């Protein structure tokens, strides 16, 4: 994979394109989860999961007030870890 | 030692610390002034960004809004944290790779247009100024109470302090000052919450206490729902408002978070692209510590307050005026009454203060039978809740002093960060980038400082008559950032096709329509009484002015894409610039230009 670093940084190689579409795919998956826990479980889908009780109220309330925040944290750290790995895989990491 | 002296000691000591750090880290060159030479570790940067970003809205205002509305105001919790996901995934690493100092610089270069840069500067100034007004509202509330001065004097003192260290410190001073401020504010927020959670549920972690059982063996939230509905208020955990508006509001706050220039600037200051990704995560860790506690603070305070007014239970007699005046547990009511933000009145002259929802039909029956003549807790400003909370729960005097220092840390740190964004936009993007490109480094720094002074004067003036509670004013600022800056940045990275004309048209439409919508509901330039509509009956469906940012963002995206399609594709070198931004390889240190 060492030959990739010899390209000037402004030219997009075939691998660079694959790197970008892999990145976009990971972003899309993360954003689907992001929307599901907040807009979904926290607001719209709350009635559907209201049968699951959490300390005097229901799961949707927990997602709206705490659960989404915890999932957001997990998403950002997952993305950072996954992308730093992807950078190395495609040899596009910083020196 | 009396409470006033204790407050002075805590507030004074924390100020001395911040100013000391600002002097110690005084900026020399322009590069240090804006970005601290990029030597900031992701964890340090995360902590400073958290302090920078968590403002009076988060610290002073948010829990109060949750306490008196319940579930429906979860929007603030999700909105103000969910934006970090957008920031970390869609903006931070690419803007760091781009390697310039300011947001307008990126927009100007990517859209190869000084006009785009100018429009970005205007958007930034409008959003940041609105945001500073919200901070000043918080500063006024905090100083009004703790220094026992009126609101206007409090604002002026706060303005002088912010100005002092933002002007003399610059980014480096601000970064380390903000680390100190984070520590003060998180301790001030958490310690009283731990005490109160222990008192009510026996659980030392407030975030768990919220879902725990109280002394009676019943879950806290269930007790709360019960007593508030007994008094004719809406059940705390239930959804009452409009779902569409709730979705839009949450989305506006999220997009706005990712579009606020003073937050984005932070990610220019980390050493590497990979650090920018981690940095967003660390920032959210430090923010989450407060945000997971806030809903507990709100619910527990609501419970404590309601029980104070109905000490024998909601079906028995209300608290007597005599008790309020003589029992030390009610001292907080007298002290807060002085600020004019709390008021009660024995309307029916029965010697008791009945706190209930006098608009609820079932309560009108009970009131008629008992001889009540309306709710007698006539004024309870939501913004006082967090600051009054330790007093309501009868916590020791030093906790109250600490909360005073924390609230001010939150307001001042954000105000300073915003002023820095404002001053760099004016000096770097407007003066050096447009008016006088050959200006000396010294002249640039001078213009930065003049811009700060002007911004703080305007914000202080408008802060005296704010368009809403601190968190609501701040929500408007997020809406403006969402409608103008975020779409331009995102399209600049994720589309090679969006061109100069498209981006400028998009930003102008997004910002313009949102500004007009807000002014129509909140008054032109926030002057009270000049509004044609009210948020209780908004112009478009159920969309409140605080939620309109998401609509503005959609308009921005749509306009930019349509106009770009109809006009010429960006030149080759711009398309190459976009390609290089997408790849971490070759990210050097940032350069001024």
Image: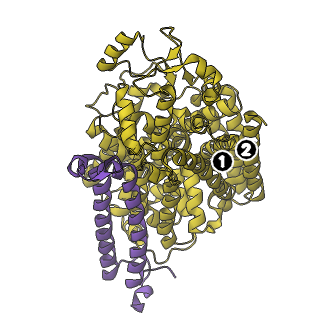
Q: Could you tell me how far apart the alpha carbons at marks 1 and 2 are, in whole angstroms?
A: 31 Å
Q: Position of residue B329 (x, y in %)?
A: 61, 30
Q: Chain of mark 2?
A: B
Direction from residue A62 to residue B317 in the image, left or right: right
Residue B505's image quarter?
top left
Which quadrant is the N terminus of chain B positioned in?
A: top right
Kindly indicate the quadrant of the structure image that contains residue A6.
bottom left
The image shows residue B348 at horizontal and vertical percentages of 47, 8
The residue under label 2 is B10
Q: Position of residue B330 (x, y in %)?
A: 60, 27
**Letter of the chain that mark 1 sits on in the rendering:** B
Colour mapping used in the image: by chain
Residue occupied by mark 1: B448
Q: Residue at x 49, y 71 (%)?
A: B273
Image position, residue B398 (x, y; %): 70, 43
- Drawing shade for chain A: purple
Have a look at marks 1 and 2 and say if they share a chain.
yes
Mark 1 closeness class: few <14, some 14–19, many ≥20 residues within 10 Å: many
Q: Secondary structure at mark 2?
A: helix
Q: What residue appears at the point 43 percent right and 39 percent down from the top-left corner?
A: B66
Chain B shade: yellow
Q: Is residue B205 above or below residue B127?
A: below
On the question of residue B131 being in view, the answer is yes
């Amino acid at each position: 994979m060492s030959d990739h670093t010899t390209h000037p940084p402004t030219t997009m190689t075939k691998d660079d394109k694959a790197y970008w579409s892999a990145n976009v795919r990971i972003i899309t998956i993360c954003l689907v989860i992001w929307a599901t826990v907040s807009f979904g479980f926290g607001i719209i889908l709350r009635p559907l999961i209201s049968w699951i009780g959490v300390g005097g109220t229901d799961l949707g309330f927990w997602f709206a007030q705490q659960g989404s925040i915890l999932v957001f944290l997990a998403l950002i750290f997952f993305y950072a870890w996954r992308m730093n790995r992807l950078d190395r895989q495609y040899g596009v990491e910083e020196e | 030692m009396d409470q006033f002296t204790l407050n002075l000691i805590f507030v004074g000591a924390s100020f001395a610390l911040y100013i000391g750090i600002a002097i110690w880290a005084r900026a020399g060159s322009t590069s240090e002034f804006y970005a601290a030479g990029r030597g900031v570790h992701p964890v340090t940067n995360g902590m400073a960004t958290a302090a920078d970003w968590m403002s009076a809205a988060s610290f002073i205002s948010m829990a109060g809004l949750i306490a008196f509305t319940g579930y429906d105001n979860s929007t603030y919790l999700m909105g103000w944290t969910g934006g970090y996901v957008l920031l970390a995934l869609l903006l931070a690493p690419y803007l760091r790779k781009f390697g310039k100092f300011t947001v307008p610089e990126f927009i100007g270069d990517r859209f190869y247009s000084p006009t785009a840069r100018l429009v970005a500067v205007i958007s930034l100034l409008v959003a940041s100024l609105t945001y500073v007004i919200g901070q000043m509202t918080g500063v006024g509330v905090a100083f009004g109470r703790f220094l026992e001065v009126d609101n206007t004097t409090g604002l002026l003192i706060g303005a002088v302090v912010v100005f002092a260290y933002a002007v003399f410190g610059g980014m480096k001073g601000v970064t380390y000052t903000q680390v100190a401020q984070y520590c003060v504010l998180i301790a001030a927020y958490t310690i009283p919450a731990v005490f109160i959670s222990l008192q009510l549920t026996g659980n030392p972690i407030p975030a768990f206490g919220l879902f725990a059982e109280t002394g009676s063996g019943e879950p806290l939230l269930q007790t709360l729902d019960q007593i508030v509905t007994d008094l004719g208020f809406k059940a705390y955990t239930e959804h009452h408002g409009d779902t569409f508006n709730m979705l839009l509001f949450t989305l506006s706050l999220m997009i706005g978070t990712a579009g606020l220039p003073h937050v984005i600037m932070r990610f220019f200051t980390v050493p590497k692209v990979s650090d920018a990704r981690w940095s967003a995560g660390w920032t959210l860790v430090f923010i989450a510590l407060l945000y997971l506690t806030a809903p507990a603070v709100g619910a527990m305070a609501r419970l404590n307050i309601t029980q104070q007014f109905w000490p024998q239970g909601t079906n028995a007699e209300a608290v007597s005026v005599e008790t309020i005046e003589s029992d030390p547990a009610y001292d907080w009511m007298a002290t807060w009454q002085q600020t004019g933000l709390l008021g009660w009145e024995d309307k029916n002259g029965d010697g008791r203060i009945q706190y209930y929802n006098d608009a609820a039909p079932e309560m009108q029956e009970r009131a008629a039978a008992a001889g009540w003549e309306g709710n007698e807790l006539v004024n309870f400003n939501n913004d006082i809740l967090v600051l009054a909370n330790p007093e309501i729960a009868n916590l020791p005097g030093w906790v109250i002093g600490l909360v005073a220092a924390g609230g001010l840390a939150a307001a001042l740190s954000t105000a300073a960060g915003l002023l820095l964004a404002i001053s760099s936009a004016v000096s770097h993007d407007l003066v050096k980038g447009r008016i006088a490109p050959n200006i000396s480094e010294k002249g640039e720094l001078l213009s930065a400082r003049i811009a700060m002074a002007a911004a703080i004067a305007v914000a202080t003036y408008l802060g005296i008559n704010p368009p809403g509670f601190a968190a609501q004013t701040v929500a408007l600022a997020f809406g403006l950032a969402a409608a103008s800056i975020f779409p331009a940045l995102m399209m600049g990275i994720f589309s090679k096709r969006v061109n100069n004309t498209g981006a400028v048209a998009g930003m102008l439409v997004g910002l313009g329509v949102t500004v007009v919508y807000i002014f129509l509901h909140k008054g032109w330039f926030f002057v009270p009484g000049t509004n044609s509509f009210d948020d209780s009956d908004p112009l478009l469906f159920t969309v409140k002015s605080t939620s309109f940012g998401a609509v503005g963002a959609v308009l921005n995206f749509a306009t930019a894409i349509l106009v770009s399609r109809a006009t010429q594709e960006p030149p080759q070198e711009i398309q190459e610039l976009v390609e290089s931004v997408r790849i971490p390889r070759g990210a050097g240190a940032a350069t001024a230009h």
